[in-house]
Amino acid sequence: MNFIKKSILFIALTTLTFGSAQETITNESVVQMVDLGFDDYMIIDKINTSDVKFDASISALGKLKNAGVSSEVLSLIMDKSKQNTKSKTGIYYTDASGEDKLVQPSVFSGSNSNAVAQKLVSGLINSKKKAQLPKTQSNNVIRQSKPEFTFIFDPSVTEVDNMQNNQGGDTGIFNWWFRMASNPNEFVLVKLTVKEKKNLREVITGKSSWITSSSGIDPKYALNFAIEEIEGHKFKVTPDNLEPGEYCFIYQGQVPQGRENQSVFDFSVQ
């Protein structure tokens, strides 16, 4: 009787494998197979013959282990989670359907310095430099207050690699941010100020007076986010609760020679 049950399960699993070639196996899929009584060799065969999208973070692996997933299957999940990193460098968020969506970078449309409009303080003029993005809302819309992002880096990727990887889905200037950087600490998360009448969003990127000047995001405007390493150069980034509004990640690390950091990874929380 046990042999008959296993045979039925194997036939069902084989049919599913060849009949649903586009199916993507996730952590949840593995738990479902365990709950249905699939043996390890069946689960491993299904993983090896399917597209996969695994979360191999420590917390996710703990949930899988508690759900009864064997060490052999966990090891395969960890190995599979490393695949295709080079072709997927960038920042991703998970939408309501559970699909990973790439956060496409937006380019600053201009800048504004309000030195003339500032008040005189002890005879000195203080000004703020602001970078501006077109439109009052990002094309990357997230409908949850505590979204999770996945940052994928690959310092070994050359600009030629990036050019080839981005053909047909150009993410802007070869995705060089994720070749220069190695972890999310080289980015800062800020909330953008929306200017309805001007149909734009802006962020303060520097301050200056006739005595001193500074560039970059003031730390007091940076929003907190937690970082968890998933595997190698892949990280899970979870900001603190975000109220509805416009936000962006800005790269603050080293800029390669001949480039300007004129893009941000913007998103809208609704």
Image: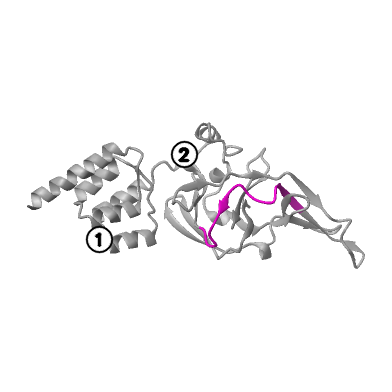
Asked which colour scheme the image uses, the reply is one colour
User: Where residue 255 appears, x then y in whole percent?
Assistant: 64, 45
Query: Left or right: where does residue 127 sit relative to residue 58?
Result: right
Q: Quadrant of residue 119?
A: bottom right
User: Badge 2 local density, few (<14 within 10 Å), some, or many (20+)?
Assistant: some
Residue where numbered disc 2 is placed? 87
User: Where residue 254 appears, x then y in whole percent?
Assistant: 62, 48
Q: Secondary structure at mark 1?
A: loop
Prevailing secondary structure class for the magenta stretch in the rendered image: loop
Q: Earlier in the sequence, mark 2 or mark 1?
A: 1
Of the pair 44 and 242, the residue shown nearer to us: 242
Q: Nearer the viewer, mark 2 or mark 1?
A: 1
User: Where residue 84 appears, x then y in whole percent?
Assistant: 41, 41
Residue 68 numbered mark, or none:
1
What residue do we see at 89% from left, 56% from top?
116
What residue do we see at 49% from left, 57% from top?
148
On whether residue 247 falls in the magenta region, the answer is no
Q: Amino acid at mark 2?
A: Ser
Of the pair 77 and 258, the residue shown nearer to us: 77
User: Where residue 228 appears, x then y in whole percent?
Assistant: 46, 59
Q: Is residue 70 visible?
A: no
What residue do we see at 47% from left, 42% from top?
88
Query: Left or right: where does residue 171 sit relative to residue 76?
Result: right
Query: Left or right: where does residue 33 sit relative to residue 25?
Result: left
What residue do we see at 58% from left, 41% from top?
176
Q: Amino acid at mark 1?
A: Gly
Highlighted range, magenta: 130-147
User: Badge 1 local density, few (<14 within 10 Å), some, or many (20+)?
Assistant: few
Q: Secondary structure at mark 2?
A: helix
Query: Left or right: where does residue 100 sit relative to residue 54?
Result: right
On whether residue 140 falls in the magenta region, the answer is yes
Q: Residue furthest bottom?
A: 122
